[in-house]
Image (tube, grey):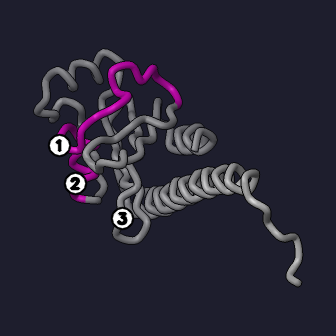
Amino acid sequence: MEETLPLILKHMDLVSGRIYLLDKSGKSLVLVAHHGLDPGGLQRMRITEGFSGLAARTRSFVAYPVSSLQDRNRASLLHSKGIKYVICVPLTLGEKLAGIMNLSSDKEWTLDDNVLALLTAVGNQLALAAYNAQLYKGFKKGTRIWIRISKHMEIPTRCE
């Protein structure tokens, strides 16, 4: 995921990007990757707040100027980092939300059909990568448990 952000930012002339994954409770987004500006104060957010929360709840693209944020504290934080425009891309696998990719611009930004198609494809791939990473993590945990159990058992090496 870390490698994806610099490519997107360079291609689209954006200043920063952050990737958040939905936590197990389904109520918060947790920062897992970032590139560009310091993400201080943006490491975790509830899905009930900000543009990211809106994108998570609706599972749709959100692209707004920071000045339209209702949360003045969050708007102030983003402005202090030089961010003027935020694009939130839902990371979905089918109907399941995996997270949100935030892209930030220091100027007005236009979301056209080609950009939408590209970001949709990237978002789907990131969601799949997150899902596969989760499966792998579960597989590793299961393997470690099996190894511990097998040390205390006599397991036949062949069928007789």
Q: Between marks 1 and 2, how big is the CA–CA gap? A: 8 Å
x 76%, y 51%: residue: 151
Q: Position of residue 114 (x, y in %)?
A: 45, 62
Q: Position of residue 149 (x, y in %)?
A: 67, 54
Q: Between marks 3 and 1, how big is the CA–CA gap? A: 17 Å
- Residue at the spot of label 3: 96
Looking at the image, is mark 2 or mark 3 nearer the viewer? 3
Q: Of callouts 1 and 2, which one flags the residue occurring earlier in the amino acid sequence?
A: 1
x 60%, y 43%: residue: 7
**For residue 119, which numbered disc appears in the image?**
none
- Residue at the spot of label 2: 57
Front position in the image: 110 or 18:
18
- Residue at the spot of label 1: 48
Q: Position of residue 24 (x, y in %)?
A: 36, 49
The residue range painted magenta reads 35-58
Q: Of callouts 2 and 3, which one flags the residue occurring earlier in the amino acid sequence?
A: 2
Q: The residue tagged with tag 1: helix, strand or loop?
A: loop
Q: Specify the amino acid type for callout 3.
A: Lys
